Amino acid sequence: MEQRLARGRRGILFVFTGASGVGKGSLRAAAADALRTVTYSVSATTRARRPAETDGVDYHFLERSAFEEMVARGEFLEHADYVGDLYGTPAAPVDTALAAGRDVLLEIELAGARQVKAARPEAVMIFIAPPSLAELERRLRGRGTDSEAKIQRRLARARDEIAALREFDYLIVNDRLEAAAETLRAVLAAERARAWRVSDAEIDGFLAS
């Protein structure tokens, strides 16, 4: 029944937001079994590529001028300045996947998440929080990728992000990774099972079969 009712359904847009260093990538990896059918939207950014990152996989790494040209052409679903670097979600791949019935996951910052929610009210908003700001600071310092000034800016930004968590549909505290991954799996399952997502045409087709 589930497969027949789901036929032709539009994909679900999931928005994944949390402070830098909260472990969003680790959480995605831990819940990979539940995310295997989800299209992960690769964001564009002007920040420098880290040693372990691959262009086109982790991010599309762009020069600021190229990024700004895309903004001018209206090619981003959302875009924002995050502690001095530009980030944005190319709209075309997202819309193509959703129209094809594939769920899409956007991993973006608070300002971008607000833009997406305004443009796509049906988006499912998920906030990933650290167990504490002290733990977040420990994780940021442990990465060894940022200057002291940037760490302080990230922590200040994190306070603003956590204060806005009531704007989201779900909160996942990334304290114990596997427990957080289990919560994410439950969120995905619950959203996919919502009855309002089934169209009248799908119901009619099912009843007639």
Image (spheres, rainbow, N blue to C red):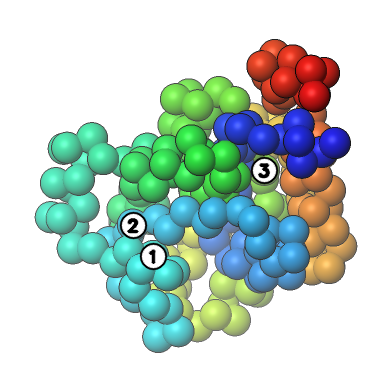
Q: Is residue 134 left or right of residue 16?
A: right
Residue 65: x, y in percent?
Answer: 12, 55
The residue wearing badge 3 is 126
Give the crowd class for mark 2: few <14, some 14-19, many >=20 residues within 10 Å: many
Q: Are marks 1 and 2 in contact (CB under 8 Å)?
A: yes
Query: In the rendered picture of this protein, how many numbered marks are placed on residues?
Result: 3
Q: Quadrant of residue 169?
A: top right
Q: At which x and y percent is residue 29?
A: 67, 70
Give the numbered dot on residue 59: 1
Q: Quadrant of the C terminus?
A: top right
Mark drawn on residue 151: none
Q: Which residue appears at 39% of the width and 65% of the height?
A: 59
- Residue found farthest to the bottom: 51
Q: CA distance from mark 3 to mark 1?
A: 20 Å
- Horizontally, is 42 left or right of 201 in the view? left
Position of residue 4 in the picture relative to residue 41 (left or right): right
First along the sequence among labels 3 and 1:
1
Question: Marks 3 and 2, how far apart in space?
Answer: 20 Å
Q: Amino acid at mark 3?
A: Ile
Identify the secondary structure beneath mark 2. strand
Q: Label 1's element?
A: loop
In x, y percent, where is residue 118? Answer: 48, 24
Residue of label 2: 44
Secondary structure at badge 3 equals: strand
User: Considering only order in the chain, which callout, 2 or 3, is on the residue closer to the N terminus?
Assistant: 2
From this viewpoint, is residue 136 visible? no
Q: Quarter of the image containing the N terminus? A: top right
Kind of residue indicated by mark 2? Ala
Q: Residue at x 61, y 53 (%)?
A: 38
Q: Earlier in the sequence, mark 1 or mark 2?
A: 2
Residue 50's image quarter?
bottom left
The residue at the point 80 percent across, 44 percent down is 189
